[in-house]
Amino acid sequence: MCAHMFDPTLREERIAHAYAQLPGALAGSATVTALFAITACGTGGSVHLSWWIALQGLAIAANVAILVAYRRGRFEPDRAMWARRGGTLLVGVGWGLGGLVWPMHAEFGTGIAMSFCLAGLAASATSTLAADPIGYAMFAITALGPDVAASAGPRWWTAGLLAAFLGASFFMVWQNAVVLRAALSLRFENAELLARAIADREAADAARANAESAALAKTRFLAAASHDLRQPLQALSLFADVLATEPPVPEARRRAATDALVRTVHALRSMLEGLLDLSRLDAGIVVAEPQVVSLAPIVGEVIAALHDEADARGVTLSAAGPVLDVHADPALLARVAHNLAANAVRHGGRGRVLIATRRRGDRAWLQIFDQGAGIPLDARERIFEEFVQLGNPERDRTKGLGLGLSMVRRICALAGWSLSLRSDVGRGSVFTVELPLATSAPTREPSRSVPPATRAVRILLVDDDVLVRQALEGWLEQCGCEVHVVGSAEEALDALRAGCAPDAVVSDLRLPGALSGVDLAQRIDRPVILLTGDVDVPEEHRAAAVLRKPVSGATLWATIAETIERQRAA
């Protein structure tokens, strides 16, 4: 129990309780002192009594000063308690001296009155000092001790009563302290339960609001995605009908339909890739791998990629600023820079788009300025939502899909970069990405070109989807590859055991039977390139490369060439 009496969690409450009782205790002490002063005047008094009354006044004044200092926050918790004890000790010493002075200069009855008065003060202090048993012991011993000693002779029975009362008072203050601590603990527990209940309710309200917001966002997302996916699918269906017309259409119309078909497929693939990238970011699959990278090549690649589109839109695309090295994931940084610049080119109107780099202390700023219509204040959060495009109600796909800024915000949050927007309606906007400056120069590996193969590349193709398998086989053969086609991982293992020696294996991740593409990659010593439409891929895949569908023929061939080159160099 003793350990609980001085529990640090209750210390401040005990101190506050002790000071809250101080005004009443001082008022009682002052009243009793005044009564004895009046008595002293009636009995003629003495110099000793006058000094005692003055000492009592000083003790009360000192306690008032301590109380004022506490209320003004002059004391730290430990000092506050010891200041309270110091004031209590002064009052106790004053009353103890009174127990010695009054019996010498007053009638016998007045001395007894002083003894009973001291006992009454000690009894009342068991309540006012319940928060501080140590302070009570200091008061009771200094106030009653001298009177007990002085009463041992002529008033021995008074001394005995006072000594017994002193012992009983210690027990009483201890019991009061236990009750006070229990009350304070209960109050803390109730307050904690109430706070927890409020926090739980707020958390439940927040979770419900988030769920409702997520459901609404999902509905908007699906509605927008449904519309934007149906458009190229509609065109794709019609172009396919044109090409399948009997009798065959004229060559010029067939070529035009084929070109349009290719553009439509590219648009559809671009949308699917954007949706897959968003889902990978939301699923936490993308991991930032920061390294020292120079901003200049990234900015140069962005300008080169958007140069033709900017010219077609009448936009001047340029760069300015010092050459800065930052500590960032180069692929994620390139995506952010490209998306912001593409957004400015497509929605900034005619004028100038500037990609600027700036140094700010130990940070680097990558800024994209445009001279467009600006973004209204009420839309500056909404533009970061999926499929939201201001000024494009007709959903013109040449202005993008409305996924770029949403992806930028997700990447910046993932990488820990600060993203800000400043815009003046009618004058333009500026997006700023704040990056950590690098403390060392980037490492640049010498470029290596892939030497031409001296023979046809042998590919083992593993896929159970007939249409996909035919398309891949046709493309690879057109690239000059020798292609061996199987429909499952088990068939691929049988082919390898039968003597098939491919330079690389191109396999779907999901395959029929007990083995997947991941299992196949783990069981053979040939480089495996996995094709998948899944957002998540097991980390232990051991494949040479993983490509997410839809994959262009150029990307597939470049990956095959790089994989074979790595295999030859190993």
Image: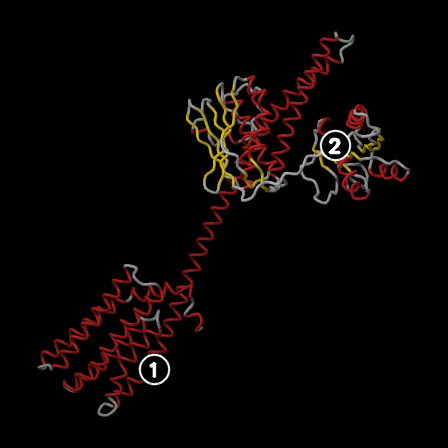
Write down the residue under mark 2: 450
Q: Position of residue 263 (x, y in %)?
A: 66, 19
Q: Quadrant of residue 264?
A: top right
Query: Residue farthest to the front?
Result: 446
Q: In the rendered view, would you say 388 is above or below 86?
A: above
Left or right: 566 with respect to 220?
Answer: right
Q: Position of residue 212 (x, y in %)?
A: 53, 37
Label 1 sits on what residue type?
Gly
Q: CA distance from mark 1 to mark 2?
A: 99 Å
Residue drawn at (41%, 26%) of the image: 424
Residue 182 — which label?
none
Circle 1 sits in a helix, a strand or a loop, which is it? Answer: helix
Left or right: 447 with respect to 521?
Answer: left
Q: Front-most of 218 and 304?
A: 304
Write down the residue under mark 1: 167
Of the two numbered discs 1 and 2 in the rendering, the one whose residue sits closer to the viewer: 2
Q: Position of residue 552 (x, y in %)?
A: 71, 27
